[in-house]
């Protein structure tokens, strides 16, 4: 198997690709992101130390950890006829290129790609808990997470009250360095390119008429920091609502009926995560089948559990990771018929 890892969770995603492959009896080649190779190499050092100390039995060649650019190392791995599966976490554009490369040898792919998670907020929710969960789901890792809350739809009857609480909560989020005490709500972006991307998306939204309630600009000083931002007066078809921001920016819109909210939430090319805040179990049951996303969170923070199945629909990917179904990605089904 080949595993291609992103920069936002270098160790977690690498472990997610190595463990099920080894359990299934596969040898593994993992490529770290060229942006964050040291975490993966430290894991390789610890594995080597354990093998040399006799604490771990792993034959040479069973696990290999590489780093390098996608245009060189990644291209070589995904064009090779050797692997039986290529598992990749990253952008939709790169996933499409990997699919094209793998198609030459009909190699199976498992792709966890981008997201644009909608949040539906109903009038019967616990408003304070809802705001806390949404903000936590937006600013975690400075928003550089594929299943972060990316757009919020609020029932019109509570829109003003919700917006007031959301803006206050976002404004209270401290932006600092990872080792600050107390720990900040979010830190800087991974690179200047990521900061420039977020700045550009928000600036274009403002030029199109978006109203900025808080944030809306980069923060001076060390690191690539951006202030937690809330936007309203945005169009459903706009870039800020349809494309993944990957930063602490929340566009907020209103709706009247649950049917309308479902239509707005599903109006997106991505299909990874979604959430609903309500105490009405009739709506929860509808969301279970009518929200067209691989994951739906009910009245809780956006983050998957290892026993679940982290899988996207549409342009958010193919296949998935974690749990029983994640292990099955690394197995093939064979049927034997015996005639006596």
Image: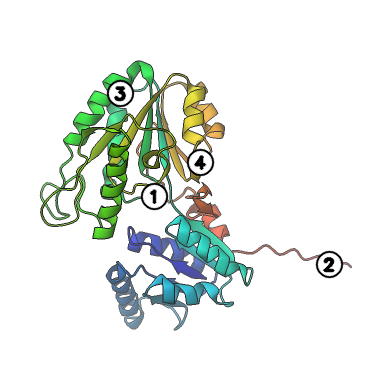
Q: Nearer the viewer, mark 3 or mark 4?
A: 4
Write down the residue under mark 1. 146
Labels 2 & 4 near each other (Cβ < 8 A): no
| Dot 3: element | helix
Cα separation, mark 2 vs mark 4, equals 42 Å
Write down the residue under mark 2. 338
Q: Does label 2 or label 1 sit earlier along the sequence?
A: 1
Q: Does label 4 or label 1 sit earlier along the sequence?
A: 1
Q: Alpha-carbon neighbours of circle 4 within 10 Å: few (<14), some, or many (≥20)?
A: many
Q: Does label 1 or label 3 sit earlier along the sequence?
A: 3
Cα separation, mark 2 vs mark 1, equals 47 Å
Q: Can you give x and y, in whole percent of width and height, for residue 113 in the image?
A: 46, 54
Labels 2 & 1 near each other (Cβ < 8 A): no
Cα separation, mark 4 vs mark 1, equals 13 Å
Q: Alpha-carbon neighbours of circle 1 within 10 Å: few (<14), some, or many (≥20)?
A: many
Write down the residue under mark 3. 127
Q: Which quadrant: the C terminus? A: bottom right
């Amino acid at each position: 198997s080949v595993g291609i890892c992103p920069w936002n969770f270098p160790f977690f995603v690498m472990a997610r690709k190595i463990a099920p492959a080894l359990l299934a009896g596969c040898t593994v080649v993992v490529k770290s992101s060229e942006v964050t190779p040291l975490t993966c190499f430290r894991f390789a050092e610890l594995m080597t130390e354990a093998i040399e100390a006799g604490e771990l039995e792993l034959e040479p060649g069973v696990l290999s950890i590489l780093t390098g650019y996608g245009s060189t190392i990644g291209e070589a791995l995904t064009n090779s006829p050797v692997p039986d599966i290529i598992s990749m976490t990253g952008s939709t554009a790169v996933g499409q290129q990997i699919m094209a490369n793998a198609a030459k040898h009909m190699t199976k792919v498992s792709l966890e790609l981008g997201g644009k998670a909608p949040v539906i907020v109903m009038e019967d929710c616990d408003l304070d808990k809802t705001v806390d969960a949404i903000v936590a789901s937006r600013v975690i890792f400075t928003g550089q997470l594929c299943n972060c809350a990316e757009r919020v739809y609020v029932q019109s009857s509570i829109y003003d009250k919700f917006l007031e609480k959301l803006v206050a909560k976002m404004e209270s989020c401290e932006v600092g360095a990872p080792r600050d005490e107390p720990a900040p709500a979010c830190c800087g972006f991974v690179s200047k390119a990521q900061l420039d991307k977020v700045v550009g998306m928000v600036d274009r939204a403002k030029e199109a008429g978006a109203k900025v309630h808080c944030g809306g600009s980069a923060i001076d000083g060390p690191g690539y920091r951006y202030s937690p931002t809330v936007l309203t007066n945005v169009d459903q078809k706009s870039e800020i609502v349809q494309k993944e921001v990957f930063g602490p920016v929340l566009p907020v819109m209103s709706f009247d009926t649950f049917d309308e909210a479902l239509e707005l939430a599903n109006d997106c090319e991505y299909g990874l995560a979604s959430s609903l805040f309500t105490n009405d179990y009739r709506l929860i049951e509808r969301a279970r089948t009518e929200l067209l996303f691989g994951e739906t969170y009910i009245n809780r923070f956006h983050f998957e559990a290892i026993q679940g199945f982290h899988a996207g629909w549409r342009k958010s990917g193919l296949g998935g990771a974690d749990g029983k179904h994640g292990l099955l990605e690394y197995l093939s089904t064979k049927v034997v018929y015996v005639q006596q």
